[in-house]
Image (tube, rainbow, N blue to C red):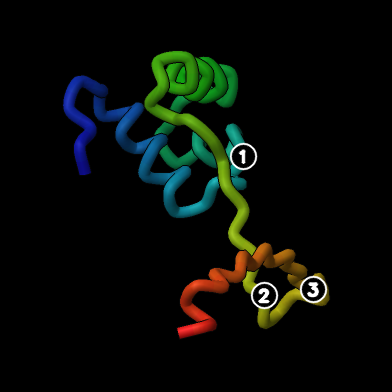
Amino acid sequence: MYLDGLDKLDQKIIQLLIENARISYSDIGEEIEISRVAVKARIQALEKKGVIEEYTTIINPQKSAVLCHAILRLKQNLSICHR
């Protein structure tokens, strides 16, 4: 993983967020022994620098009651059909 230029605390914060993007500032703080306020400030700085771009939810469609719908747009090429 390319984390050069970040200190050890920022690297650990990123690792914890990779493992669980829903982890609380308090839990991160306990893990790396800094305050939740310091964790929040560091995460906001990482977001501002573009190191953290977004937090994503991945849904397992096999375990979700939500149905997936698709609209297909088909274009017929008549020159191929009449050969």
Q: Earlier in the sequence, mark 2 or mark 1?
A: 1
Circle 3 packing at 10 Å, graded few (<14), some (14-19), many (20+), is few
Residue 66: quarter of image: bottom right
Residue 10 percent location from the top left of the image = 35, 27
Q: Secondary structure at mark 3?
A: loop
Mark with earlier residue (2, 3): 2
Q: How many numbered circles are shown?
A: 3
Q: Residue at x 44, y 54 (%)?
A: 19
Quick one: SS at disc 1? loop
Give coordinates of residue 2: x percent, y percent. Answer: 20, 37
Work out whether 40 lies above or below 62: above
Which amino acid type is marked by label 1? Answer: Ser
Instruction: Please give the label number shown on residue 61.
Output: 2
Q: Secondary structure at mark 2?
A: helix
Residue tagged by mark 1?
A: 24
Residue beneath the point at 17% across and 27% down: 4
Where is the N terminus found, in terms of image quarters?
top left
**Of label 1 and label 3, which has the lower sequence position?**
1
Question: Which residue is label 3 attached to?
Answer: 67
For the residue pair 45 and 81, the one nearer the viewer reads as 81
**Residue 20: x percent and y percent?**
52, 52
